[in-house]
Image (tube, rainbow, N blue to C red):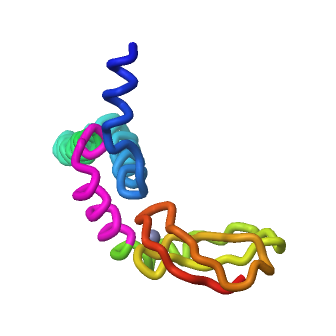
Amino acid sequence: MDRFKKFIKSRYGMDSLNKFLILASLVLSIFQGLAASYDKVKLAGFLSTFAISFFVFFAYRALSGNMALRRLENEKFRKISWPLRKNLRKKPRDKKYAYFTCPNCHKSLRAPKNLGKIRVTCKECHRQFEVRT
Ligand SMILES: [Zn+2]
């Protein structure tokens, strides 16, 4: 059991890109099932190939031990998908917090208001930068 825990801890795990991959794989599987039920055999085969590829890529990244490279991939993914994501998220905001985005990976971050100028570390890419709250 301890060896298993150690193994999981040394693996990369979940990030934005992996969330996208597992979701894409799931959605493609659903459409593949639909296509198959309508006897669209070629389309179903095409979709399942993609669903499996996404899943394999997800599993590979989640179990990878190369943190630096995986983090770099995730950063690139966040940069590319930023124009899409910024329109998608419209969460209600807590007025007690100041909201800002990481200058490096555009992750949305927050900090309690009225702290003045503070130094924050991005949860996603670990870049440090200063913000005024
Ligand atoms: Zn960041």
Q: Is residue 88 left or right of residue 104?
A: right
Question: Is residue 82 left or right of 133 when viewed as pictured?
Answer: left
Q: Quadrant of residue 8?
A: top left
Question: Who is closer to the viewer here, 5 or 119?
Answer: 119
The residue lying toward the viewer, choosing from 39 and 82, is: 82
Q: Foreground residue, 35 or 17?
A: 17
Whether 51 is drawn above or below 110: the answer is above
Q: Is residue 36 visible?
A: yes
| Residues in magenta, as a range | 61-78
The residue sitting at 47% across, 74% down in the picture is 128
Residue 102 drawn at (x, y percent): 50, 76
| Residue 113 point in image, percent of width and height | 78, 77
Residue 62 found in image quarter:
top left
Look at the image and say whether residue 63 sits in the magenta stretch. Answer: yes
48 to 113, vertically: above or below: above
From what the image shows, is residue 105 above or below residue 41? below
Classify the position of ligand 1 by quadrant: top left, top right, bottom left or bottom right.
bottom left
Q: Residue at x 33, y 18 (%)?
A: 3
User: What residue do we see at 41% from left, 46% from top?
Assistant: 14
Picture coordinates of residue 19, whole percent (x, y): 42, 50
Q: Is residue 73 magenta?
A: yes
Answer with left or right where residue 85 lies relative to residue 4.
Answer: right
Q: Magenta segment, principal secondary structure?
A: helix
